[in-house]
Amino acid sequence: MKRDLLSLQDLTREEIIGLLELTEQLKQDKYQLNNQLKGKTVGLVFQKPSNRTRVSFEVGVFQLGGNCLYLGPSEINLGVRESTADVSKTLSRYLDGIVARTHSHQDIVELAQYSSVPVINGLSDLYHPCQALADIFSIREKFGKTEGLILAYIGDGNNVCHSLLLGCSKVGINARVATPPKYEPQKDIVGLAKSYAKETDAEIILTHSPKDAVKKADIIYSDVWVSMGQEKESEKRLKDFKGYQINAELAELATKDYIFMHCLPAHRGQEVTADVIDGEHSIVFDQAENRLHTQKAILITLLGEKP
Ligand code: CP
Ligand code: NVA
């Protein structure tokens, strides 16, 4: 039966660890397992712009011996030119897998529901599972472990925050999320993360105080204050998020060897200052690179030739 990756809810802790181990192997030699997608075609159905996700999937599929098709909004305008169900049923007749980037998460759920081939979430309004997997891989690479570390996420309780909450709780990373009031992560997703955290002895804390969150943290994480699709709210958001910037003064409160993470794209001077994101603690380009390796592990697991 085909399997999808719409959210980290879809993976058990053991499956996540398995993906991290496969990623490690793939990172050591990028042409390893290069026949896994031989003769296969993956479609990228993207309704929003992308640098990292598009390029890392295209390159990853190529390195595994397959072929990629980019299907942007002018080719496939989900639900506008034709229904999402019809798009999904049609693409399933041509493709071996679909990576989708949509506005509404419901569109990805619907794509997966009508598709006979695996669907991978390349970012929706609710989740960014591929990013969180690459982030957990990057954290493990830097610290040699995940259990017991403290990650402080400062900013918007958005798609990236949701996937980090699910991913961290599954691998035993304590997650502290500091948002302005009314920008907290969704309650049901926090509830899920707390239920996973019970099994790994991790702690999930929500606060409105960036200082409380960052105190003795091993990892400081930030994302944009205005996500794609929220441009009309820009002015209000920039005001509401004042005080949630990662700068040298805030970072002082973290551990001495803390790492700074950001999924990118970033806005220097808004959610993070240039000295922090371009400084010695920042691993943002390792994160970007690791998207390639983790997604190859995902592709092999969901679409690859089984031995
Ligand atoms: N981090 C991330 O998903 O980047 P893109 O929007 O450029 O794909
Ligand atoms: N939260 C951001 C992440 C971009 C990778 C957005 O949705 O635009």
Image (tube, rainbow, N blue to C red):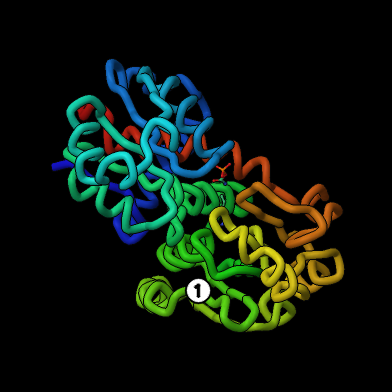
**Residue 288 falls left or right of residue 201:** right
Q: Kindly identify the amino acid type of the residue bearing the numbered disc 1.
A: Pro
Quadrant housing the C terminus: top left
> Dot 1 surroundings within 10 Å: few (below 14), some, or many (20 or more)?
many
Of 236 and 139, nearer the camera is 236
Residue shown at 37% from the left, 71% from the top: 196
**Residue 214 falls left or right of residue 302:** right
Residue shown at 36% from the left, 35% from the top: 76
Identify the residue under disc 1.
185
Asked whether residue 219 is in view, the answer is: no
Q: Residue furthest front?
A: 81
**Residue 77, picture quadrant:** top left
The spot of residue 274 in percent (x, y) is 84, 52
Eyeballing the image, is 117 above or below 159? above
Eyeballing the image, is 248 above or below 187? above
- For label 1, the SS is loop
Q: Residue furthest left?
A: 1
Residue shown at 38% from the left, 44% from the top: 19
| Label 1 CB-ligand 2 distance < 8 A | no
**Residue 221, picture quadrant:** bottom right
Quadrant housing the N terminus: top left
**Residue 305, picture quadrant:** top left
Of 156 and 216, nearer the camera is 156
The spot of residue 195 in percent (x, y) is 35, 77
The spot of residue 30 in percent (x, y) is 49, 24
Callout count: 1
The spot of residue 269 in percent (x, y) is 82, 58
Eyeballing the image, is 127 above or below 243? above
Residue shown at 28% from the left, 38% from the top: 302
Asked whether residue 232 is in view, the answer is: yes
